[in-house]
Amino acid sequence: MEYRNFLERLIISAGILSLQFRKDLGNLDVSSKNGTVRDLVSEADESIESFIRRQIEQHFPEHKVIGEELGASRPGPKDFCWVVDPIDGTVNFVKGFVYYSVSIALQQNGQTLCGAVYGPAMGQLYIAERGAGAFGYRVQLPETVLQADSLDLQNLSDDYSLEGKQRLKVRPLEQLSEAVLVTGFACVRAGIQPNNYLYLGYVLPRVSDVRRLGSAALDISAVAAGVFDGFWEIGLSLYDLAAACLILEEAGGHYSDLYGNMEDYPCSVLAAGPGLHGRLVDLLAEVDKPYNGFRSLLQQAKNAE
């Protein structure tokens, strides 16, 4: 519970910083990563991750931190490690679109103990503790916080309230034709070949619909909440998945790679409720037939990583 309470305050405080940065997006310093304009990083990403790291180092100095923007912190014992994505959905963030998130998880020896995904601009918090369930809340912030003129990068905030507590549970859907799925294209941004375009073209006519919103952590959390029925994507990283996959598990969902294999955090991910997960594995396997071995090419690309 100590870690869970700290996590709640930490992720909401980080989200408040993101909201303060959003007030002046026109002057935000934005650059590209890996030489591509499809993969952006902003000063907000780096400042928020630095804030998160400082808070963790202050409260748990023996813990390790792995973050998307600043990598792994100083060497230390491997039993506790915080996994941080300061802004999942940076393109959405810098464009002023509300669908982005902060994602933070605590792992012990590679197993996630607790995790949270917070969509600050939507006021939506998802949080889970292993063995204790997953919950969703509406985060209420006072106007004094939202109207602050300067960024306080020093302290955790207690100036918020949580409302509308909801225990998360995946939908018990089994019919593909009724499923609304969500996906993403991190593989295209990263230049991974083969990519997700062929999967999308095959899946879309066989389900109710597919959405593409731009934050994998929020997408998987929304599957946990029963908003969507399943998610798949190629080319994700640990910091995209650690918190959201625990939230999904604690809501009764399953995740695997696209072939149905369980790995710690596979870079190609399929997430759904138990009634749909196996059917989606079978559906994605069918991509191999009309596209002459595309699935085999994906496996070769994975093996070459």
Image (tube, rainbow, N blue to C red):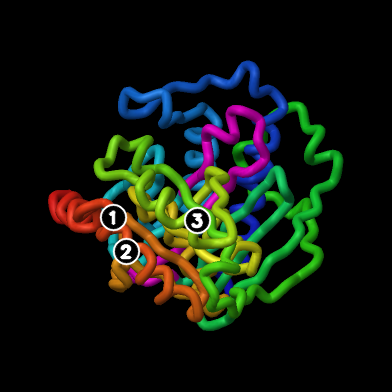
Residue 295 visible, this angle: yes
Mark 3 or mark 2: which comes first in sequence?
3
Residues 193 and 16: in front is 193
Amino acid type indicated by mark 3? Pro
Instruction: Check disc 3 and report its element: helix, strand or loop.
Output: helix
Instruction: Check disc 2 and report its element: helix, strand or loop.
Output: helix
Judging by the rendered image, the residue that carries numbered circle 2 is 286
- Measure the alpha-carbon separation of dots 1 and 2: 8 Å
**Label total for image:** 3
Residue 85: x, y in percent? 47, 47
Q: Residues within 10 Å of mark 3 (few under 14, many from 20)?
A: few
Residue 235: x, y in percent? 33, 48
Mark 1 or mark 3: which comes first in sequence?
3
Find residue 177 and report its image quarter. Answer: bottom right
Please tell me whether residue 180 belongs to the stretch shown in magenta.
no
Residues 305 and 204: in front is 204
Amino acid type indicated by mark 1? Pro
Amino acid type indicated by mark 2? Glu
Residue occupying image coordinates x 49% and y 75%: 276
Q: Which mark is residue 205?
A: 3
Q: Which mark is residue 290?
A: 1
Q: Residue furthest front?
A: 290
Instruction: Check disc 1 and report its element: helix, strand or loop.
Output: loop
Residue occupying image coordinates x 60% and y 61%: 222
Q: Are marks 1 and 2 in contact (CB under 8 Å)?
A: yes
- Measure the alpha-carbon separation of dots 1 and 3: 14 Å
- Measure the alpha-carbon separation of dots 3 and 2: 13 Å
Q: Residue furthest right?
A: 143
Residue 155: x, y in percent? 64, 45
Q: Which region shows up in magenta?
A: 85-112
Please tell me whether residue 95 belongs to the stretch shown in magenta.
yes
